[in-house]
Amino acid sequence: MIIKNVSRKAIKMKRFKKQFLAAVLVVALGAAVYLNWSLSAPKAASKTLGESKYVNATISTTAVKPSKNSGVKQTSNSKYKNDTESLTVKQKKFFAQAKTTRDSTQDKVIDKASEVLGLDSSSKSEKTKAQSNIAAVLKNFTLQDTIESTLKAKGFSNILSYISDDGCTVTVVKSELEKIKPIVVKSTVQNVTNISFDKITIVTI
Protein backbone atom coordinates (compact mmCIF):
# COMPACT_ATOMS: atom_id res chain seq x y z
CA MET A 1 0.00 0.00 0.00
CA ILE A 2 2.84 2.43 0.85
CA ILE A 3 4.65 1.67 -2.43
CA LYS A 4 1.47 2.23 -4.46
CA ASN A 5 0.96 5.59 -2.75
CA VAL A 6 4.56 6.53 -3.54
CA SER A 7 3.92 5.56 -7.17
CA ARG A 8 0.94 7.87 -7.45
CA LYS A 9 2.84 10.69 -5.78
CA ALA A 10 5.79 10.21 -8.12
CA ILE A 11 3.57 10.52 -11.19
CA LYS A 12 1.90 13.63 -9.79
CA MET A 13 5.34 15.15 -9.05
CA LYS A 14 6.26 14.66 -12.72
CA ARG A 15 2.99 16.22 -13.88
CA PHE A 16 3.28 19.29 -11.69
CA LYS A 17 7.07 19.74 -11.94
CA LYS A 18 6.81 23.17 -13.57
CA GLN A 19 4.49 24.48 -10.86
CA PHE A 20 6.83 23.11 -8.21
CA LEU A 21 9.85 24.79 -9.74
CA ALA A 22 8.01 28.11 -10.03
CA ALA A 23 7.48 28.09 -6.29
CA VAL A 24 11.07 27.08 -5.61
CA LEU A 25 12.36 29.96 -7.75
CA VAL A 26 11.04 32.41 -5.17
CA VAL A 27 13.52 30.94 -2.71
CA ALA A 28 16.15 30.63 -5.45
CA LEU A 29 15.98 34.32 -6.24
CA GLY A 30 16.58 35.10 -2.59
CA ALA A 31 19.63 32.86 -2.70
CA ALA A 32 20.71 34.60 -5.89
CA VAL A 33 20.76 37.99 -4.21
CA TYR A 34 22.75 36.62 -1.28
CA LEU A 35 25.26 34.84 -3.52
CA ASN A 36 25.60 37.95 -5.68
CA TRP A 37 26.62 39.87 -2.58
CA SER A 38 28.88 37.19 -1.11
CA LEU A 39 30.70 36.38 -4.35
CA SER A 40 31.32 40.03 -5.22
CA ALA A 41 33.93 40.23 -2.46
CA PRO A 42 37.53 39.74 -3.66
CA LYS A 43 38.81 36.21 -3.20
CA ALA A 44 42.29 34.75 -3.48
CA ALA A 45 41.46 32.26 -6.21
CA SER A 46 44.19 32.75 -8.80
CA LYS A 47 45.11 29.06 -8.71
CA THR A 48 41.54 27.93 -9.19
CA LEU A 49 41.02 30.29 -12.10
CA GLY A 50 43.59 28.43 -14.13
CA GLU A 51 41.75 25.16 -13.59
CA SER A 52 38.67 26.20 -15.59
CA LYS A 53 37.78 23.89 -18.43
CA TYR A 54 36.58 25.16 -21.78
CA VAL A 55 34.82 23.29 -24.54
CA ASN A 56 34.20 24.97 -27.87
CA ALA A 57 30.61 24.33 -28.82
CA THR A 58 28.29 25.34 -31.58
CA ILE A 59 25.25 25.36 -29.43
CA SER A 60 22.69 28.33 -28.17
CA THR A 61 17.35 29.50 -25.63
CA THR A 62 15.10 32.23 -25.86
CA ALA A 63 16.85 34.93 -23.91
CA VAL A 64 15.16 35.83 -20.65
CA LYS A 65 15.62 39.18 -18.97
CA PRO A 66 15.48 39.43 -15.19
CA SER A 67 11.96 40.35 -14.10
CA LYS A 68 11.40 43.82 -12.75
CA ASN A 69 10.06 42.12 -9.65
CA SER A 70 12.83 39.56 -9.39
CA GLY A 71 14.61 41.47 -6.65
CA VAL A 72 17.72 41.94 -8.82
CA LYS A 73 18.41 45.59 -9.40
CA GLN A 74 19.49 46.41 -12.95
CA THR A 75 21.07 49.77 -13.68
CA SER A 76 22.91 51.19 -16.65
CA ASN A 77 26.06 51.44 -14.52
CA SER A 78 25.88 47.89 -13.17
CA LYS A 79 29.18 46.05 -13.21
CA TYR A 80 27.39 42.95 -14.45
CA LYS A 81 24.83 44.16 -16.94
CA ASN A 82 22.76 41.64 -18.89
CA ASP A 83 22.87 42.19 -22.64
CA THR A 84 20.28 39.78 -23.98
CA GLU A 85 19.81 41.74 -27.17
CA SER A 86 23.43 41.10 -28.15
CA LEU A 87 22.87 37.34 -28.51
CA THR A 88 22.88 36.09 -32.07
CA VAL A 89 19.98 34.17 -33.55
CA LYS A 90 22.18 31.07 -33.51
CA GLN A 91 22.94 31.48 -29.80
CA LYS A 92 19.29 32.02 -28.89
CA LYS A 93 18.29 28.97 -30.92
CA PHE A 94 20.91 26.84 -29.21
CA PHE A 95 19.86 27.72 -25.69
CA ALA A 96 16.20 27.00 -26.50
CA GLN A 97 16.94 23.63 -28.08
CA ALA A 98 19.52 22.59 -25.49
CA LYS A 99 17.23 23.31 -22.56
CA THR A 100 14.44 21.34 -24.23
CA THR A 101 16.81 18.41 -24.75
CA ARG A 102 18.07 18.58 -21.15
CA ASP A 103 14.57 18.64 -19.70
CA SER A 104 13.49 15.79 -21.97
CA THR A 105 16.46 13.67 -20.88
CA GLN A 106 15.69 14.19 -17.21
CA ASP A 107 11.95 13.70 -17.76
CA LYS A 108 12.71 10.26 -19.22
CA VAL A 109 14.38 9.25 -15.96
CA ILE A 110 11.20 10.17 -14.08
CA ASP A 111 9.02 8.36 -16.63
CA LYS A 112 11.07 5.19 -16.40
CA ALA A 113 11.13 5.28 -12.61
CA SER A 114 7.37 5.88 -12.50
CA GLU A 115 6.81 2.81 -14.66
CA VAL A 116 8.86 0.70 -12.26
CA LEU A 117 6.84 2.00 -9.31
CA GLY A 118 3.61 1.19 -11.10
CA LEU A 119 4.47 -2.44 -11.84
CA ASP A 120 3.36 -5.07 -9.34
CA SER A 121 6.17 -7.27 -10.66
CA SER A 122 8.86 -4.79 -9.59
CA SER A 123 10.88 -5.88 -6.58
CA LYS A 124 11.15 -3.80 -3.43
CA SER A 125 14.78 -2.92 -4.25
CA GLU A 126 13.82 -1.82 -7.78
CA LYS A 127 11.09 0.42 -6.44
CA THR A 128 13.40 1.88 -3.81
CA LYS A 129 15.93 2.72 -6.52
CA ALA A 130 13.18 4.25 -8.69
CA GLN A 131 12.09 6.47 -5.80
CA SER A 132 15.69 7.56 -5.32
CA ASN A 133 16.07 8.37 -9.03
CA ILE A 134 12.95 10.52 -9.03
CA ALA A 135 14.08 12.41 -5.93
CA ALA A 136 17.52 13.03 -7.47
CA VAL A 137 16.10 14.39 -10.74
CA LEU A 138 13.65 16.70 -8.99
CA LYS A 139 16.49 17.98 -6.82
CA ASN A 140 18.61 18.61 -9.93
CA PHE A 141 15.76 20.54 -11.55
CA THR A 142 15.77 22.91 -8.59
CA LEU A 143 19.55 23.25 -8.43
CA GLN A 144 19.84 23.93 -12.16
CA ASP A 145 17.26 26.70 -11.98
CA THR A 146 19.02 28.20 -8.96
CA ILE A 147 22.37 28.20 -10.76
CA GLU A 148 20.86 29.86 -13.81
CA SER A 149 18.95 32.48 -11.80
CA THR A 150 22.03 33.31 -9.75
CA LEU A 151 24.32 33.69 -12.76
CA LYS A 152 21.76 35.84 -14.54
CA ALA A 153 21.77 38.07 -11.49
CA LYS A 154 25.52 38.39 -12.02
CA GLY A 155 25.14 39.54 -15.61
CA PHE A 156 24.92 36.52 -17.90
CA SER A 157 22.15 36.98 -20.45
CA ASN A 158 21.55 33.26 -20.77
CA ILE A 159 22.86 30.10 -19.11
CA LEU A 160 22.35 26.39 -19.45
CA SER A 161 23.30 24.22 -16.49
CA TYR A 162 23.14 20.44 -16.51
CA ILE A 163 23.79 18.29 -13.45
CA SER A 164 24.59 14.60 -13.84
CA ASP A 165 26.47 11.90 -11.97
CA ASP A 166 29.66 13.24 -13.58
CA GLY A 167 29.27 16.74 -12.18
CA CYS A 168 27.87 19.96 -13.62
CA THR A 169 28.26 21.51 -17.05
CA VAL A 170 27.48 25.19 -17.47
CA THR A 171 27.14 26.80 -20.90
CA VAL A 172 27.49 30.57 -21.16
CA VAL A 173 28.12 33.20 -23.82
CA LYS A 174 31.85 33.46 -24.50
CA SER A 175 32.00 37.27 -24.61
CA GLU A 176 30.21 37.48 -21.26
CA LEU A 177 32.54 34.96 -19.64
CA GLU A 178 35.50 37.14 -20.65
CA LYS A 179 34.00 39.96 -18.58
CA ILE A 180 32.57 38.07 -15.61
CA LYS A 181 35.33 35.41 -15.36
CA PRO A 182 35.18 31.61 -14.89
CA ILE A 183 35.80 31.81 -11.14
CA VAL A 184 32.39 33.46 -10.69
CA VAL A 185 30.68 30.61 -12.55
CA LYS A 186 32.50 27.86 -10.67
CA SER A 187 32.07 29.50 -7.27
CA THR A 188 28.36 29.92 -7.89
CA VAL A 189 27.90 26.29 -8.92
CA GLN A 190 29.92 25.05 -5.97
CA ASN A 191 27.98 27.18 -3.48
CA VAL A 192 24.65 25.97 -4.86
CA THR A 193 25.48 22.28 -5.34
CA ASN A 194 28.64 21.50 -3.31
CA ILE A 195 30.11 19.98 -6.48
CA SER A 196 33.91 20.27 -6.48
CA PHE A 197 35.64 22.59 -8.95
CA ASP A 198 37.24 19.73 -10.87
CA LYS A 199 33.78 18.39 -11.73
CA ILE A 200 32.45 21.71 -12.99
CA THR A 201 32.91 22.22 -16.73
CA ILE A 202 32.36 25.58 -18.43
CA VAL A 203 31.25 25.50 -22.06
CA THR A 204 31.30 28.69 -24.11
CA ILE A 205 29.24 29.51 -27.14
Image (spheres, grey):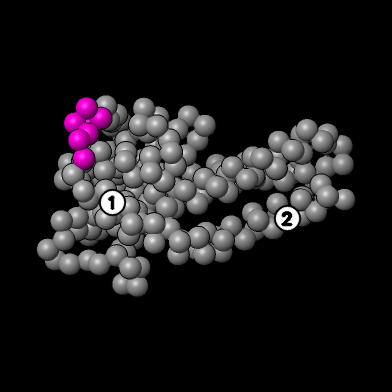
Quadrant housing the C terminus: top left
**Mark 1 residue crowding within 10 angstroms, few (<14) / some (14–19) / many (20+):** few
**Can you tell which quarter of the image residue 57 is in?**
top left
Q: Can residue 205 be seen in this view?
A: no
Q: In this view, does 126 lie to the left or right of 177?
A: right
Amino acid found under the numbered disc labelled 1? Ser
Q: What element carries label 1?
A: helix
Judging by the rendered image, the residue that carries numbered circle 2 is 9
> In the image shown, does 138 or 158 lie closer to the viewer?
138
Disc ID at residue 5: none
> In the image shown, does 50 or 163 lie closer to the viewer?
50
Q: Residue 138 in the image: x percent, y percent?
A: 58, 49
Magenta region includes residue 49: yes
**Mark 2 residue crowding within 10 angstroms, few (<14) / some (14–19) / many (20+):** few
Q: Residue 50 in the image: x percent, y percent?
A: 22, 27
* Image label count: 2
Amino acid found under the numbered disc labelled 2? Lys
Judging by the rendered image, the residue that carries numbered circle 1 is 38
> In percent of the image, x 50 and y 63: which residue is there?
22
| Separation (CA) of disc 2 from disc 1 | 37 Å
Magenta region includes residue 72: no
Segment tinted magenta in the rendering? 43-50
Q: Residue 18 in the image: x percent, y percent?
A: 55, 60
